Image (spheres, rainbow, N blue to C red):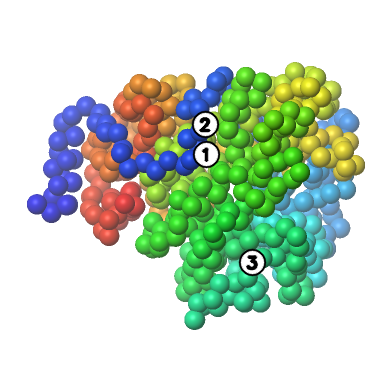
Amino acid sequence: MDSFKLVLVFILVTAMSPIFYCFGQNQIPIERIEMMSNKPEPFILRDWKRVAIGYDSLVFNLDLKGEYLPLTRINKNTLNYPEHESFHQHTFVGDTTRNESINSFMAIIGATLCGVDKRNQYGKDWVLMSEEWFNRECGLNLYSDAVGRSSEKSFWYDLIPNVLFYQLYDLYGSVGQFDNQFVTIADRVIECLEVLGGQIEPQKFPNMNYRGFNFGTMQPFPDVVSQPEAVGAMGWLLHKAYVITGEKKYLDWSDLCIETFSSFVESPVFELQYLYGTAAAARMNAEMGKKYDLNKMLDWCFDIGPLRRWAHTLGWGAVVGKWNGMDASGLLAAISKEGNTDFGDFSFIMNNFQLCGILAPVARYDTRYARALGKYILNASSSMRWFYSAYLPVENQDCHEWASKYDPDSYIAYEALRQYKNGKSPFATGDAMEYGWAKTNLSLYSSSGVGYLGGILQTTNVEAILKIDLIKTDFFHDDSYPTFLYYNPYSTAKEVALDLGESNFMIYEATTNKVIKAAATGICNLNIPEDSAFVIVLAPSNGKLSIHDKKTVINNIVADFD
């Protein structure tokens, strides 16, 4: 009997049966995540979507009055696009000089992921006004973190604004000159790769042992600390350019970038760019049959890497264990050397929001990592509450007075969290006050990405079993059905209620490649085994199911990639 007939037989059997479950035996552990608690204690989950929407309404409200308010102002003297106004947004509360695209782009994208229309809010088109960060007047023809600057001397500051613009383009489409900017950015990235020695035929990897690249002079910036992970972000950008344009050159260069990224022996992790290389690798493996070393890349995302190693730290990685008797696992941080109780681990919240949002779709493209990623997101989404004033004693933070008066719902986070400071643990703080950047350590730059988490998370009827949307942050994805990850951290099986409303769905479970229900409506209970994950796909109940190149396809849309 061929595989298609076997699937049809299975559908007929399960259609007459109660909810079916089977523990997926093919899950691949990620070593550092395995060291974390299955269920953090205490488990305290903020309503991250509510936080994101509240943050947006606080930060973009032009009419607020008070110390350091409003946090955004309109700029009518624009440089790159004088035909329309732009806006200036604080980087920290109490900082009026810096105006960074990374901050504002994440805020717009995050709010949009949580349902806010940023093209029409408070009478302003915040999406169109974002064009001002595309530095065309100086001839750079790229998005930068600052207006009018020809180079940032760092791959991080040159590439991440363009990565975020691509996400904005996916969410809002043809706004202003977005169409032209989208293609121009991809071509500029290829120019950079060629200067760095990259070549398609015969294949030659670019030399990524630089801190950054001057897109004005087209020369790299040497530095003691290089950012080789940048090639991952480049691969992500070029893959998206291929998805939209269909031009083979973008696919070829994207493949070269991810091959380069995959070839690294030592962790290239510096900040965020590695996430995008990992996400691109997972998708290209699934859709195109590539063989990038995804397992190694995911280890890099959590393990302690060597590039950001300070005197008192081992390097950059995910926290494991308890602070002051409470689980802090999942926070990305500079990990302290053992026994250092003066400083301890040093975590920054922006990185945590990005990691959750950008890596979540990996569980759809390779379901073998569903359990590991579900466990990580569960830990991180609980631990991140500590960055917010309302979740710490007054003596465990820098700026409680301003926060309690002007942000009583605690929507703005501190930039950083130290395991130890002034004899307190944990302690919410940041670099701004120490280095004179701002009057407070309450950081818009760090808080603005909260919607990446709020947009993908929902609670269920079982505490600590989250419903994680695997489509929401999968930018430029192909046609797909609603797909959700559920991780059960308990030592016993749990029944999770799936509310389908009045619609009729086929319920497909991708970790076990099984149809749970051929036709279901209303409330259905998923019986999830202990310490395991389900990836649930909601397809049309009358869908035609078939197998193509190992992929499960329903009505010509892929439901399961292997």
Residue 237 image position (x, y, % from top left): 57, 62
> Comparing marks 1 and 3, which lies closer to the viewer?
1
Residue that label 1 marks: 32
Residue at the left extreme of this rendering: 1
Q: Quadrant of residue 94?
A: top right
Looking at the image, which residue is at 62% across and 76% down? 197
Q: Quadrant of residue 261?
A: bottom right
Residue 321 image position (x, y, % from top left): 58, 28
Residue 283 image position (x, y, % from top left): 44, 56
Judge by depth and name the residue closer to the eye, 172 or 437.
437
In this view, 484 is above or below 242: above
Element on which disc 1 rests: helix
- The three-letter amino acid code for the residue at tag 2 is Met
Element on which disc 3 rests: loop
Looking at the image, which residue is at 58% across and 33% down? 320
Judge by depth and name the residue closer to the eye, 48 or 422.
422
Residue at the front extreme of this rendering: 339
- The three-letter amino acid code for the residue at tag 3 is Met
Task: Please state if 23 lies on the left or on the right of 410 as rendered.
Answer: left
Residue 28 image position (x, y, % from top left): 39, 43
For marks 1 and 3 on the same chain, the one whose residue lies earlier in the sequence: 1
Q: Are marks 1 and 2 in contact (CB under 8 Å)?
A: yes
Residue at the bottom extreme of this rendering: 202
